[in-house]
Image: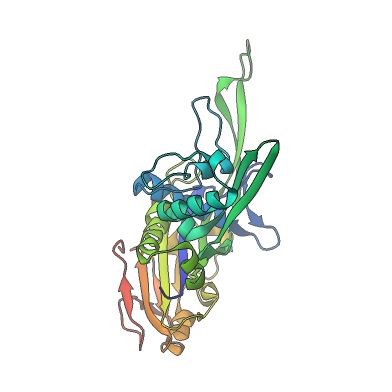
Amino acid sequence: MNRSELLFLYDITDANPNGDPMDENKPRLDEETGINIVTDVRLKRTIRDYLHDTKGKEIFVREIRDEKDNLQDAKMRAEDFLLDENDSKLDKSKLTIADMKNIIGKNVLRECIDVRIFGATIPLEKKEGTKTLGGSLTYTGPVQFKMGRSMHAVNMVHIKGTGAFASGANKSMSTFREEYFLSYSLINFYGIVNENAAAHTALRDEDVDLLLEAMWKGTKSLISRSKAGQMPRVLFRVVYKEEDYHIGELDKYISLKKNDEMMRDEELRDINQVQIDVTELINKLSANRDNVDRVEYALDSRVTLINNENAYNPAEAVEGVEFIALPFND
């Protein structure tokens, strides 16, 4: 597996892409610039949910409750993988912490696609007499994302409304609710797939293929009240030939061009009001073509890319760089 870089754009309309639970669940903003911020954890959750719920893949980081509705903690989750070759549960009282690390680590990497992709810190614990022994497994994730940032300043809306239920027993008034959402946000995520860490988590090429599918389809399929209307718009994966090499900061080489130059950023409401300028990105790829193996891409049909102010289709040839459409490309 070679190193690769990821560039992913998606947008959301009249919704909340990533609320801050410490601030009334408001969409996260850079207060100085009005830029919308989305955490890498939010994108990883989208990917995990798609892999588990849609593709039927086992993931380590998920909510599991027992028959009493108690939430499983990380140590309990680790012991789900304390299994022998026949998938029978092992008695940890007969094992050392080193044994547990070896068995759980092997099984987790074999079974859990999210650990192979994103890594994990897995705590372990056992008792020996009156002593509690502990340890942990740490896997650095081969795939890392920066915080996502909107490509423009956003407009945040605050609304109030009434709930469906009474505010308390023997009350005639219903509860009130408040919520915050963004009129529109086009969000830019940058990521990297590190082949060195991939060797330690046994990341496979087919795992990366599923990652790309989950980014695209999982974003579109995230149909909750606060996320309905998310649409994937652009996905590039730049795969390199040379080990320990990448261009870096691909998100810095694309920009937004409004069709109406007099329109304020906060007035944007739809993808058809802008063009994505990839001129710098194409120039950078061309300049590094000797190190680029290929570019895989997906593009929503409503997106307009421009290169040197002309409409650009990634299917067009770029000198020395092969562009390959992903299976879910529009």
Taking the spot 48% from the left edge, 84% from the top edge, the residue there is 284
Residue 232 percent coordinates (x, y)? 41, 58
Q: In this rendering, is residue 293 above or below 129? A: below
Return the residue nearer the eye: 9 or 59.
Answer: 59
Residue 103 appears in view: yes
The foreground one among 259 and 127 is 127
Comparing 91 with 1, the one in front is 91
Q: Residue at x 49, y 37 (%)?
A: 64
Q: Is residue 264 visible?
A: no
Q: Quadrant of residue 293?
A: bottom left
The image quarter containing residue 290 is bottom left
**Percent coordinates x, y for residue 251 in the rendering:** 53, 72
If the image is split into quadrants, where does the C terminus sit?
Answer: bottom left
User: 57 or 262, which lies in front?
Assistant: 57
Q: Residue at x 41, y 66 (%)?
A: 235
Tell whether 53 sits left or right of 32: left
In percent of the image, x 64 and y 56: which residue is there?
29
Residue 61 point in image, percent of width and height: 51, 47
Q: Is the image coloured rainbow, by chain, by secondary structure, or in one colour?
A: rainbow
From this view, report whether residue 36 is shown above or below residue 72: below
State which quarter of the image contains the N terminus. bottom left
Q: Position of residue 149 (x, y in %)?
A: 57, 62
